Image (spheres, grey):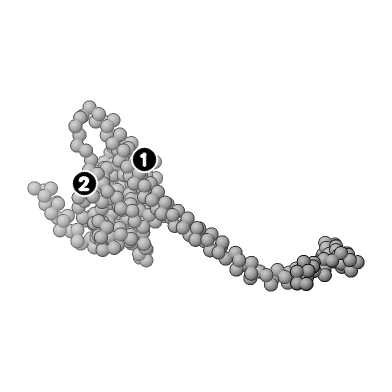
Amino acid sequence: MLRSTMQTPPQFFKPNSKSLTRIFFFVLLSISVMVADTRFNALSEVRQAIATVIFPLQKLAYFPFSLRERIEQYVSDFRLIEEIDHLRREYLSSRYDFFRLRTLISENERLRALLGAAKQTEVQTVLTEILYVPRDPFSRKVTVGKGSSNGIKAGQIVMDDLGVIGQVTRTYPWTAEVTLITDKNHLVPVQIERNSLRTVISGTGRNGELELRFLSISTDIREGDLLITSGIGGVYPPGLPVGRVTHIEYDRSHKFARIICTPVAGVDRHRQVLVLVGLPLPAPEISDDPELHAPQTKRKIQNQEL
């Protein structure tokens, strides 16, 4: 009796007239619902209500996949940031090597008859970022995010991918103060790349402006000439771009021409800079108090008189 009961199909699937009527009814109901929804959009509110109810369940079901995508995106962004930082470091280093190579090529063209010249000292570099700029509008100094603990010392040169920015004038354990070449007390020995004429360029205290002083009106200099470090004095390595001549004023009533230059480097634009370390550079003679330079100036004059 039990065996015959288990093998008996459910009442719904028994082939009789009631089951056929029931199937026909549900088929007709389904077709009516589809027609009503397609033609008259009668079930839109019901569909929206159902979607609202099951939306949290959908979000919960998709949460593991969303979490995985976010983790993969975070790891990808972190690797991308490391790669960009590495490429930026290599780019700045290669730009410095390019400047040195260009200088060496120029020297070889002029001195190729000489052999056994001494090799230039290899210069190490430290990549850092500008942390902040002083609020004083008359100060042309910035603070970078690495200091004496990273091998940075006063007197070392700071540059970007275009040229010289300034010189380290004060160091702390984890930061350093850099005086820009546009500072009015900053002097850089330079030479004109076109004719190798040596001179000294100084800041004017204004952003984006340098000046060549005490050049006679007969000096061979033109607008557009590139000024590079001459290497005289042993502070700045030779061949680094400093500025470009943008304006020359000739006044026959004066012995000297007024020559205005523009810095080649982004002294007020770029954030990442390169500090040249490894050279035994002397400390810079830059101070906000001009009286501090008076004894040194007097000693130099006395030595010249002797």
Callout 1 crowding tier (Cα within 10 Å): few <14, some 14–19, many ≥20: some
Name the residue beneath numbered marker 2: 234
Looking at the rendered structure, the kind of residue marked 1 is Asp
Q: How far is disc 2 from disc 1 in space, using C-alphas?
A: 23 Å
> With respect to residue 108, does 64 lie above or below?
below
Q: Quadrant of residue 222?
A: top left
The answer to whether one can see residue 117 in this image is yes
State which mark lies toward you, 2 or 1. Answer: 2
**Left or right for 283, reference 34:** left
- Quarter of the image with the N terminus is bottom right
For the image, the number of numbered tags is 2
Q: Which of the marked residues, 2 or 1, is nearer the chain's N terminus?
A: 1
* Helix, strand or loop under label 1: loop
Front residue (pair 14, 146): 14
Residue 292 in picture, x, y percent from top left: 19, 61
At horizontal 20% and vertical 52% (from top left) the residue drawn is 282
At horizontal 28% and vertical 38% (from top left) the residue drawn is 197
Name the residue beneath numbered marker 1: 225
Looking at the rendered structure, the kind of residue marked 2 is Gly
Given the current orientation, which residue lies at the most extreme left position?
A: 306
The answer to whether one can see residue 261 in this image is no
Check if mark 2's residue and mark 1's residue have beta carbons within 8 Å: no
Residue 239 in picture, x, y percent from top left: 30, 42
At horizontal 66% and vertical 69% (from top left) the residue drawn is 55
Residue 83 in picture, x, y percent from top left: 42, 51
Given the current orientation, which residue lies at the most extreme front position?
A: 1
Residue 196 in picture, x, y percent from top left: 28, 37
At horizontal 20% and vertical 30% (from top left) the residue drawn is 115
**Left or right for 145, reference 75:** left
* Helix, strand or loop under label 2: loop
**Left or right for 238, reference 64:** left
